[in-house]
Amino acid sequence: MSDEEETPSRRNAMTLFAGALGIGLVSCVQNEEPRLGTETQAANGSVLRWVDTVLGGSPNGARTGDLATKTSANLGNAIMALAKGCVSAGDGGGGLFYWDAAGGTDNGGTVIVPNATVGSTGPCWRRFNR
């Protein structure tokens, strides 16, 4: 079989995969009513930024991490941020976060209010649910 004959099959497989992924995402959010700042809106046409860390230190200690010190505006009006780690890049504690301008309460893990401490409230980065 030549490369020319395989190309349509690969293309069809990728199209089916992308379609299945889209159907999965739609079914996951179908049961919720979208609110401003929700995961659904963040994933739709957003600006994604890569950052090294979420906290850059312990939740209750000095925070130097990208999401702990930067707002959406500081990251070029990013609506989503993909952190490579929590304390240091590659430590396994990163994840995908979205900006919630309506705010929340910092819990030192899945909700991060920039330039604040655990228990503070305000506009925040929220981790996408797994």
Image: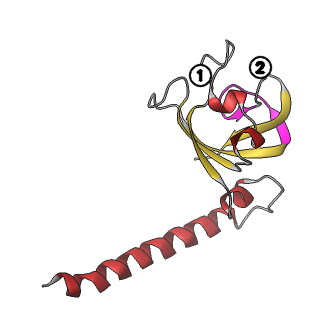
Q: Which mark is residue 56?
A: 1
Q: Which mark is residue 117?
A: 2
The image quarter in which residue 3 lies: bottom left
Front position in the image: 1 or 30: 1
From the top left corner, tell me how far across and down residue 51 is, in percent.
57, 38
The image quarter in which residue 27 lies: bottom right
Rendered-image quadrant of the N terminus: bottom left
Amino acid tagged 1:
Gly
Measure how far apart labels 1 and 2 are at the Cα level: 13 Å
Q: Is residue 7 magenta?
A: no
Front position in the image: 24 or 120: 120
Front position in the image: 103 or 51: 51
Residue range of the region highlighted in magenta in the rendering: 102-112
Which of the colour schemes (rainbow, by chain, secondary structure, one colour) is used?
secondary structure
Left or right of 99: which side holds 123?
A: right
Residue for point 56% across, 71% down: 22
Which class describes the residues within 10 Å of circle 2: few (<14), some (14-19), or many (20+)?
A: some
Q: In this rendering, which labeled residue sits more in front, label 1 or label 2?
A: 1
Left or right of 93: which side holds 3?
A: left
Is 46 placed above or below 127 here?
Answer: below
Is 63 placed above or below 69 here?
Answer: above
From the top left corner, tell me how far across and down residue 14 is, in percent.
39, 74
Residue for point 75% across, 42% down: 72
The image quarter in which residue 99 lies: top right
Amino acid tagged 2:
Thr
Q: Earlier in the sequence, mark 1 or mark 2?
A: 1
From the top left corner, tell me how far across and down residue 15 is, in percent.
43, 78
Residue for point 73% across, 64% down: 31
Circle 1 sits in a helix, a strand or a loop, which is it?
loop
Q: Which mark is residue 31?
A: none
